[in-house]
Image (tube, rainbow, N blue to C red):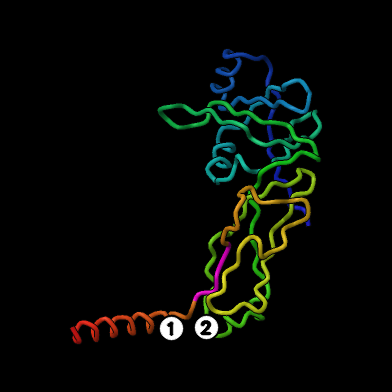
Amino acid sequence: MAKEIPDLVAEARTGSGKGAARQARRNGKVPGIVYGDHKDPVAVQFDFNTLLTKLRAGRFMSTLWNLKVDGQDDVRVICRGVQKDVVKDLPTHIDFMRLRRTSKVNLFIPVEFINQDKCPGLRKGGTLVTVRNEIELIVTAGDIPDHVTVDLSGLEVGDGIHVNDITLPAGSKPTIDRNFAIANIAAPSALRSGGDDEEEASDEAEATAE
Protein backbone atom coordinates (compact mmCIF):
# COMPACT_ATOMS: atom_id res chain seq x y z
CA MET A 1 0.00 0.00 0.00
CA ALA A 2 1.46 3.37 -1.02
CA LYS A 3 1.82 5.97 1.68
CA GLU A 4 -0.59 8.89 1.33
CA ILE A 5 1.27 12.06 0.40
CA PRO A 6 0.19 14.99 2.62
CA ASP A 7 -0.92 18.26 1.05
CA LEU A 8 0.96 21.50 1.54
CA VAL A 9 -0.98 24.59 0.46
CA ALA A 10 0.83 27.64 -0.90
CA GLU A 11 -0.01 30.82 -2.76
CA ALA A 12 1.64 32.16 -5.89
CA ARG A 13 3.88 35.12 -5.01
CA THR A 14 4.20 38.09 -7.34
CA GLY A 15 7.56 39.68 -7.73
CA SER A 16 10.95 38.42 -6.66
CA GLY A 17 13.94 39.64 -4.75
CA LYS A 18 14.36 40.90 -1.21
CA GLY A 19 11.70 43.58 -1.50
CA ALA A 20 8.95 41.14 -2.46
CA ALA A 21 10.08 38.71 0.25
CA ARG A 22 9.94 41.43 2.92
CA GLN A 23 6.44 42.40 1.78
CA ALA A 24 5.32 38.76 2.08
CA ARG A 25 6.63 38.64 5.67
CA ARG A 26 4.83 41.88 6.55
CA ASN A 27 1.64 40.19 5.31
CA GLY A 28 2.12 37.24 7.68
CA LYS A 29 3.54 34.94 5.02
CA VAL A 30 6.73 32.96 4.62
CA PRO A 31 8.20 33.42 1.12
CA GLY A 32 9.56 30.42 -0.72
CA ILE A 33 10.78 29.10 -4.04
CA VAL A 34 10.09 25.87 -5.92
CA TYR A 35 12.77 24.69 -8.35
CA GLY A 36 14.04 21.63 -10.17
CA ASP A 37 12.79 19.09 -12.74
CA HIS A 38 14.23 21.24 -15.56
CA LYS A 39 11.50 23.85 -15.09
CA ASP A 40 11.59 27.54 -14.23
CA PRO A 41 11.60 28.41 -10.50
CA VAL A 42 8.24 29.47 -9.10
CA ALA A 43 7.92 32.02 -6.26
CA VAL A 44 5.38 31.00 -3.61
CA GLN A 45 4.40 31.96 -0.09
CA PHE A 46 2.93 30.10 2.89
CA ASP A 47 0.72 31.08 5.79
CA PHE A 48 3.17 31.66 8.65
CA ASN A 49 1.25 29.91 11.44
CA THR A 50 0.32 26.89 9.33
CA LEU A 51 3.87 26.40 8.13
CA LEU A 52 5.33 26.83 11.62
CA THR A 53 2.99 24.15 12.98
CA LYS A 54 4.13 21.70 10.31
CA LEU A 55 7.79 22.52 10.89
CA ARG A 56 7.47 21.94 14.63
CA ALA A 57 5.67 18.62 14.10
CA GLY A 58 8.99 17.13 12.93
CA ARG A 59 10.23 15.25 9.86
CA PHE A 60 9.35 18.22 7.66
CA MET A 61 12.48 18.00 5.51
CA SER A 62 12.21 14.22 5.07
CA THR A 63 8.53 14.29 4.08
CA LEU A 64 7.37 14.19 0.48
CA TRP A 65 4.68 16.85 0.04
CA ASN A 66 1.94 17.37 -2.52
CA LEU A 67 2.26 21.11 -3.14
CA LYS A 68 -1.03 22.77 -4.03
CA VAL A 69 -1.03 26.25 -5.56
CA ASP A 70 -4.31 27.71 -6.82
CA GLY A 71 -4.39 27.76 -10.62
CA GLN A 72 -1.43 25.40 -11.00
CA ASP A 73 -1.03 21.64 -11.24
CA ASP A 74 -0.17 19.84 -8.00
CA VAL A 75 3.49 18.88 -7.78
CA ARG A 76 5.47 16.57 -5.52
CA VAL A 77 8.16 18.43 -3.63
CA ILE A 78 10.64 17.93 -0.80
CA CYS A 79 12.05 20.70 1.36
CA ARG A 80 15.70 21.47 0.69
CA GLY A 81 16.24 24.39 3.02
CA VAL A 82 14.62 26.55 5.70
CA GLN A 83 16.15 29.94 6.49
CA LYS A 84 15.42 31.19 9.99
CA ASP A 85 15.74 34.43 11.92
CA VAL A 86 18.96 34.10 13.93
CA VAL A 87 17.38 35.67 17.01
CA LYS A 88 13.79 34.40 17.00
CA ASP A 89 14.54 31.05 15.28
CA LEU A 90 11.43 31.47 13.12
CA PRO A 91 11.21 30.67 9.38
CA THR A 92 11.93 33.56 7.02
CA HIS A 93 12.30 31.68 3.69
CA ILE A 94 11.86 28.12 2.46
CA ASP A 95 13.10 26.19 -0.58
CA PHE A 96 11.45 23.18 -2.24
CA MET A 97 12.67 20.88 -4.99
CA ARG A 98 10.28 19.30 -7.48
CA LEU A 99 10.39 15.51 -7.84
CA ARG A 100 9.26 13.20 -10.61
CA ARG A 101 7.44 9.95 -9.84
CA THR A 102 10.66 8.10 -10.66
CA SER A 103 12.84 10.28 -8.42
CA LYS A 104 14.59 8.66 -5.47
CA VAL A 105 14.15 10.30 -2.07
CA ASN A 106 15.14 9.58 1.56
CA LEU A 107 12.11 9.25 3.85
CA PHE A 108 11.40 7.86 7.32
CA ILE A 109 8.93 4.97 7.02
CA PRO A 110 7.04 3.70 10.13
CA VAL A 111 7.66 0.15 11.40
CA GLU A 112 4.65 -2.12 12.01
CA PHE A 113 5.00 -5.27 14.15
CA ILE A 114 2.69 -8.21 13.41
CA ASN A 115 1.96 -11.72 14.80
CA GLN A 116 2.61 -10.87 18.45
CA ASP A 117 0.31 -13.79 19.32
CA LYS A 118 2.65 -16.18 17.45
CA CYS A 119 5.75 -15.01 19.30
CA PRO A 120 6.84 -17.58 21.96
CA GLY A 121 9.02 -15.00 23.69
CA LEU A 122 6.08 -12.67 24.28
CA ARG A 123 3.82 -15.53 25.38
CA LYS A 124 6.41 -16.42 28.04
CA GLY A 125 6.21 -12.91 29.45
CA GLY A 126 8.91 -11.26 27.42
CA THR A 127 8.69 -7.64 26.29
CA LEU A 128 9.02 -6.20 22.81
CA VAL A 129 11.66 -3.47 23.04
CA THR A 130 11.52 -1.19 20.01
CA VAL A 131 14.87 0.30 19.01
CA ARG A 132 13.54 2.07 15.90
CA ASN A 133 9.87 2.82 15.25
CA GLU A 134 10.86 4.32 11.87
CA ILE A 135 13.46 3.35 9.29
CA GLU A 136 15.00 5.86 6.90
CA LEU A 137 14.76 4.36 3.42
CA ILE A 138 15.63 5.40 -0.11
CA VAL A 139 12.31 5.08 -1.96
CA THR A 140 10.77 6.05 -5.29
CA ALA A 141 8.66 9.21 -5.10
CA GLY A 142 5.80 7.60 -7.01
CA ASP A 143 5.65 4.49 -4.81
CA ILE A 144 6.20 5.38 -1.17
CA PRO A 145 5.42 2.46 1.18
CA ASP A 146 2.95 3.06 3.99
CA HIS A 147 5.03 1.06 6.49
CA VAL A 148 7.69 -1.61 6.97
CA THR A 149 6.40 -4.94 8.34
CA VAL A 150 8.27 -6.87 11.03
CA ASP A 151 6.98 -10.40 11.65
CA LEU A 152 7.47 -11.58 15.25
CA SER A 153 6.45 -15.20 14.58
CA GLY A 154 8.69 -17.76 16.27
CA LEU A 155 10.92 -15.29 18.12
CA GLU A 156 12.14 -16.30 21.57
CA VAL A 157 13.29 -14.30 24.58
CA GLY A 158 16.67 -12.78 23.77
CA ASP A 159 16.13 -12.74 20.01
CA GLY A 160 16.82 -9.51 18.15
CA ILE A 161 15.45 -8.23 14.85
CA HIS A 162 17.84 -6.44 12.50
CA VAL A 163 17.15 -4.76 9.18
CA ASN A 164 18.65 -7.70 7.26
CA ASP A 165 16.11 -10.01 8.94
CA ILE A 166 13.09 -8.35 7.34
CA THR A 167 11.74 -7.92 3.84
CA LEU A 168 11.75 -4.28 2.86
CA PRO A 169 9.15 -2.83 0.45
CA ALA A 170 10.00 -3.42 -3.20
CA GLY A 171 12.32 -0.81 -4.67
CA SER A 172 13.51 0.54 -1.33
CA LYS A 173 16.74 0.20 0.63
CA PRO A 174 18.11 1.59 3.91
CA THR A 175 20.14 4.78 3.90
CA ILE A 176 22.50 3.20 6.47
CA ASP A 177 24.86 0.56 5.09
CA ARG A 178 24.98 -1.73 8.12
CA ASN A 179 22.77 -4.34 9.75
CA PHE A 180 21.24 -2.10 12.45
CA ALA A 181 18.85 -3.28 15.16
CA ILE A 182 15.12 -2.61 14.96
CA ALA A 183 13.81 -4.40 18.08
CA ASN A 184 14.41 -7.27 20.48
CA ILE A 185 12.47 -9.59 22.78
CA ALA A 186 13.63 -8.83 26.32
CA ALA A 187 13.37 -11.25 29.23
CA PRO A 188 10.52 -10.82 31.75
CA SER A 189 11.39 -8.31 34.47
CA ALA A 190 11.23 -11.04 37.15
CA LEU A 191 13.90 -13.06 35.36
CA ARG A 192 16.08 -9.99 34.85
CA SER A 193 15.89 -9.01 38.53
CA GLY A 194 16.46 -12.63 39.55
CA GLY A 195 19.60 -12.71 37.48
CA ASP A 196 20.83 -9.57 39.20
CA ASP A 197 20.20 -11.14 42.62
CA GLU A 198 22.17 -14.24 41.63
CA GLU A 199 25.12 -12.10 40.50
CA GLU A 200 25.05 -10.16 43.80
CA ALA A 201 24.91 -13.42 45.80
CA SER A 202 27.85 -14.77 43.80
CA ASP A 203 29.86 -11.61 44.47
CA GLU A 204 29.12 -11.85 48.22
CA ALA A 205 30.19 -15.52 48.28
CA GLU A 206 33.47 -14.69 46.53
CA ALA A 207 34.11 -11.85 48.99
CA THR A 208 33.46 -14.18 51.97
CA ALA A 209 35.80 -16.84 50.57
CA GLU A 210 38.58 -14.27 50.27
Q: Is residue 72 left or right of residue 112?
A: right
x, y percentage for residue 122? 57, 80
Using a 10 Å C-alpha cutoff, classify the residue at mark 2 as few (fewer than 14 neighbours), some (14 to 19) or many (20 or more): some
Ranked by sequence position, the earlier of labels 2 and 1 is: 2
Q: Which mark is residue 125?
A: 2
Magenta segment range?
182-186
Measured Cα–Cα span from mark 2 to mark 1: 10 Å
Type of residue at label 2?
Gly
Number of dots carrying numbers: 2
Image-quadrant location for residue 40: top right
Residue, disc 1: 191
Report the residue at 68% width, 22% height from top.
Answer: 43
Report the residue at 63% width, 28% height from top.
Answer: 95
- Image quadrant in which the N terminus is located: bottom right
SS assignment at label 2: loop
SS assignment at label 1: helix
Using a 10 Å C-alpha cutoff, classify the residue at mark 1 as few (fewer than 14 neighbours), some (14 to 19) or many (20 or more): few
Compared to residue 8, the image places residue 12 above or below, namely above
Image-quadrant location for residue 67: top right
Type of residue at label 1?
Leu
Main secondary structure of the magenta stretch: strand
Image-quadrant location for residue 35: top right
Q: Which mark is residue 10?
A: none
Inspect the magenta stretch and tell me whether residue 204 lies in it.
no
Frontmost residue, 204 versus 104: 204
Compared to residue 128, the image places residue 102 above or below, namely above
x, y percentage for residue 147? 69, 58
